[in-house]
Amino acid sequence: MEIVKTDIPDVLLLKPKVYKDERGFFLETYREEHLKEKNIDVHFVQDNLSKSQKNTVRGLHYQIERQQDKLLMVMQGAILDVAVDLREDSPTFGEHVAMELSAENKHQMFIPKGFAHGFSVLTDDALVYYKCSDYYYPEGERGLLWNDSELGIDWKIADPIISEKDQHQPRLSEIKEDDLF
């Protein structure tokens, strides 16, 4: 597995080795020692699966309590996966990384604690599978407005489908200090 640092070095792009033949393909989707080789010591405790239709934007979400590292992959379709740095002392605070993950490229994105996360669906639908290092804790969930102009995220879709909750999240400049990392 090739592990590549992104423009925000703590967010990693994982490129698994894919073995193909006439029957199909095989790949390892997760191998703890590969992350440990990059000094990422994570124990995952919860797996999630999300299906969304084209033009859906999910996010930007994070948990201030019971913070989560995430490892995402797309099993069907394609998404633009986005991580926004919310670590106050980070030189990349407020910046984001956006990577296309698809069933075709089989890439994965590792997003550490301290980041808001979201994605947009680029194909007719997408099946997104991800591992989390802590359990979902609704009381600790927070959000960031998906289209905050300060962030400058190009979601690569024309007519976004947004949940009611995600339409009413605060802008980065409106987030209380207690709700940052």
Image (cartoon, grey):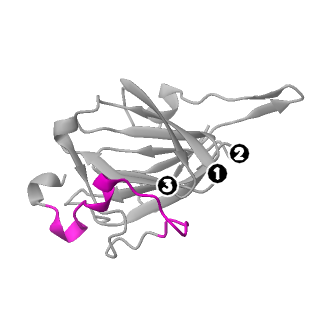
- The label nearer to you, 3 versus 2, is 3
The residue depicted at 64 percent of the width and 46 percent of the height is 77
The residue depicted at 30 percent of the width and 38 percent of the height is 68
Q: Which residue carries the number 3 mark?
A: 56
Q: Residue furthest front?
A: 164
Determine crowd level at label 1: few under 14, some 14-19, many 20+ residues with C-alpha closer than 10 A.
Answer: few
The residue depicted at 54 percent of the width and 58 percent of the height is 55
- Mark number for residue 104? 2
* Residue range (magenta): 154-175
Is there CB contact under 8 Å for labels 3 and 2? no
Identify residue type, mark 2. Glu
Identify residue type, mark 3. Thr
- Taken as a whole, is the magenta stretch helix, strand or loop? loop
Residue 75 position within the rendered picture, expressed as x and y whole percent measured from the top left: 62, 37
Quadrant of residue 172 in the image? bottom left
SS label for mark 3: loop
Q: Residue furthest right?
A: 22
Image position of 27 (left or right of 151): right
Quadrant of residue 177 in the image? bottom left
Which of 100 and 58 lies nearest the eye of the viewer? 58
Residue 57 seen in the figure: yes
